[in-house]
Amino acid sequence: MDQLCVTSLYFVWETLFLNIPIPNLSENVIGAIYTYSMGLKALRVTVSSLDQTMVKSFEVTELPVRSAKFIARKQWVVAGADDMYIRVYNYNTMDKVKVFEAHTDYIRCVAVHPTLPYVLSSSDDMLIKLWDWEKGWVCTQIFEGHSHYVMQVTFNPKDTNTFASASLDRTIKIWNLGSPDPNFTLDAHLKGVNCVDYFTGGDKPYLITGSDDHTAKVWDYQTKSCVQTLDGHTHNVSAVCFHPELPIIITGSEDGTVRIWHATTYRISSALAFPELLHYVDTCCNLDGIEVLENTLNYGLERVCVGYWIYETVVIGYDEGTIMVKIGREEPVASMDNSGKIIWAKHNEIQTVNIRSVGADYEVTDGERLPLAVKELGTCDLYPQSLKHNPNGRFVVVCGDGEYIIYTALAWRNRSFGSALEFVWSSDGEYAVRESTSKIKIFSKNFQVRILNWLIRRIDVTVKNLYWADSGDLVAIASDASFYIIKYNRDVVSAHLDSGKPVDEQGVEDAFELLYEINERVRTGLWVGDCFIYNNSSWRLNYCVGGEVTTMFHLDRPMYLLGYLANQSRVYLIDKEFNVVGYTLLLSLIEYKTLVMRGDLERANEILPSIPKEHHNSVARFLESRGMIEDALEVATDPDYRFELAIQLGKLDVAKEIATGSQTESKWKQLGELAMSTGMLEMAEDCLKSAMDLSGLLLLYSSLGDAEGMSKLASLAKEQGKNNVAFLCLFMLGKLEECLQLLVDSNRIPEAALMARSYLPSKVPEIVAIWRKDLNKVNLKAAESLADPEEYPNLFEDWQVALEVESKVAETRISSVLPFCLSLGNTAYVCVSLRKLLKHGLCFYPPAAEYVKYADKSRVNLVEAFRNLQVDEDTPFENGDLNHEVEEQNGDEDGQEEAQDEGQEEAVVIDADSTDGAVLVNGSEADEEYGTNNEGNPSA
């Protein structure tokens, strides 16, 4: 590579970066980056996407590739290199379509015809060639005329039969495809011309050139005259391009800067927001030293070699990396007056629509695009950056380029103009402009001016935007991450100014009062009364009243607020494609909330009937947030929400009424638990029944001692398959036979046998037979090892005692007699209690005060208790009644404990590892033999 060559649009001294839009690919794919490194001697063609991931890569040649273009209709990419060859690839299949030698020197540029099967190539051999791919890439025309390297060629988008070429011979030539000779030649610059581009944004017959004389020039190719020279770069201009839509010219230079020019005034543009950095593609250089002067971009990446538009971004290639910057703004320039007339600007063209033109028979749906007829209103003399109606809608101000123009809204006639950094209308038709950081001019309705140069108050916050309420008392200050609602104390400011006191650099101390701070970023906003409507960074449409934020709608795309029409109770928004949509926001709802915030509840209640029922829940939630829960309960219509409010207030009767209407199990259960905890037991029973909460009913009935309820609950639990609840109910009722049958029916036969042994000994043989039959299906030997007390009574100690006790208490058994008595733990008391119960047929429970006497339980087991029951029930009590006997028994407690300890039996242990079914009783395995116990009897 020649180190003395001047860089051009597609060439960079050591590294080549080309950025080209890719048609018909995924919308996330933005272009191709072609890189060449002198040190590595390798070329890679990379298709890049928005997230900087490599999509495609082509290894082309070891020499530099200076130009490449996409042929979308063929899904090809064509590249020209320093090896003088043109290569064609299919960028989907990665196949090489064609390779041929095109020139005798470096190929500087290739250009694709927009419709015909033609490709132009220019070279350092000073020739331009036309190739036809439908004829096998035959050269159909050679264009001669330049006397130095031909740096670039480009087709005229307005007349595709013509093209322009830029050469280091300092000329621009315009050619026709049908002639080998140029139509005409422009002596463009004092030094070589590196780049050329056609104007595409309008009807002007313009092209722009960039040269080694450090200038760029705009030409009228019809009159062959220079329209404007763009001075400012300090080195060779290597890249020039027009924005396809915006009135912008981009120039890039080897001085490392990119300049953005206004295409009408040819000044450094200040009409656009500063470009937003999207991607830094190459990692070989950081961006710490970015320098920005006005709209001159300097990213500290050495020389600029290429610039190309992709959608709303421009890709800039440097020696040390590639930059993507976003130009322009997403928010459309539009304004709506109080009658629904909308005016917007599409570049310099002004258009208007009217919401009232939508017929009354058309049903407007929230979020649906309105079918509006667009009318052309005129053009603007400057590029609009903002547009705003005055309060009565008669005038519209357009701001841009540090200037403003006031037009009539109907006829679009110029009424006034001037310089301004900012412009604002007052509520009475006056307006003010800010000419500098310290100078504000106020104009009357007749456009008379007075100067305002005093300070009201300095607020330490980075302000992105201000939104004043129509009353002039409230203002929303939007910053990067939050917004503030502050109150303007007009009387305080007036009194301070009237007093003649000097205003310091901080302004009037109490001029503003902070009311609320909301941690949300405001995209756009407006006031309706004391209600601030805005959309946030998550594109939710919210409104704020009294510091309380309510989300109205979730937007499906970025949209921007236009205004609010009170007669339609709708707020209107617009997107960047100028589609207008509306959402319902009732004025009566806003007024109601405003009055509640002010404490005027009487007037608020007068407005409440005018709010539709479907919005009452929103009102109720607002009232709840203000702590007005009772009022919220009266207003709310949603049963679930009303139930929650009633529970909060403890109004269980209201909650029960709501639950009756909804018949929701969760509501009944919640209400039942709450009623039980507050002592409303009848309501608790009804709620638990409705919720089918059997466990809750069991707790309730057992606590109340309700035998009838327990009996019904047992039946219900059986029906519902809740055997645990049914068993507990039957057991507490003393219905042991039914408990036993329930265990058998539930296939819990071992448990049934154990229960029979403890409470119904006479049933043991029957249960053992069932157990054996069931166990035979699994293990015959195990089934045979089960002992029946009728066959082996000697294995069941005190068996006759158990049968005798059962027979005596069978007829007089009352709810849980034995379990209750045994739970008291005193054997003497158990015996005496059973005797009296059997004699009188009554269930006796001692007074609660006496329960402490039986707190210390003895260690008497069940068998010992049975032994002690063998007393003649006709024997009279020697010392009177039961209580007296109990007192005596307690007095002999120490002596009885010794006797009980001696009679205490050890626990029965079943050898879980045994396979013969033997049971070890009161001894270890070493002391016994299979089939016998310690006494020589067969074991169970």
Image: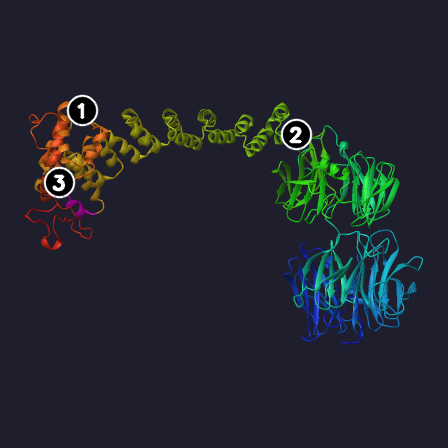
- Callout 3: few (<14), some (14-19), or many (20+) C-alpha neighbours within 10 Å? some
- In this picture, which residue range is highlighted in magenta? 779-789
Whole-number angstrom distance, CA of label 3 to CA of label 1: 34 Å
Q: Nearer the viewer, mark 3 or mark 2?
A: 2
Mark 1 lies on residue: 842
Left-right relation of 58 to 387: left
Query: Is residue 472 within the magenta segment?
Result: no
Q: Which residue is mark 2?
A: 591
Amino acid type at circle 1 is Leu
The reply to whether the C-beta atoms of the residues labelled 3 and 2 are less than 8 Å apart is no
Report x, y in % for residue 204. Answer: 88, 53
Viewer-side residue, 478 vs 926: 478
In the image, residue 535 above or below residue 671 = below
Callout 2 environment at 10 Å: few (<14), some (14 to 19), or many (20+)?
A: many
In which quarter of the view is residue 114 placed?
bottom right
- Dot 3 corresponds to which residue? 788
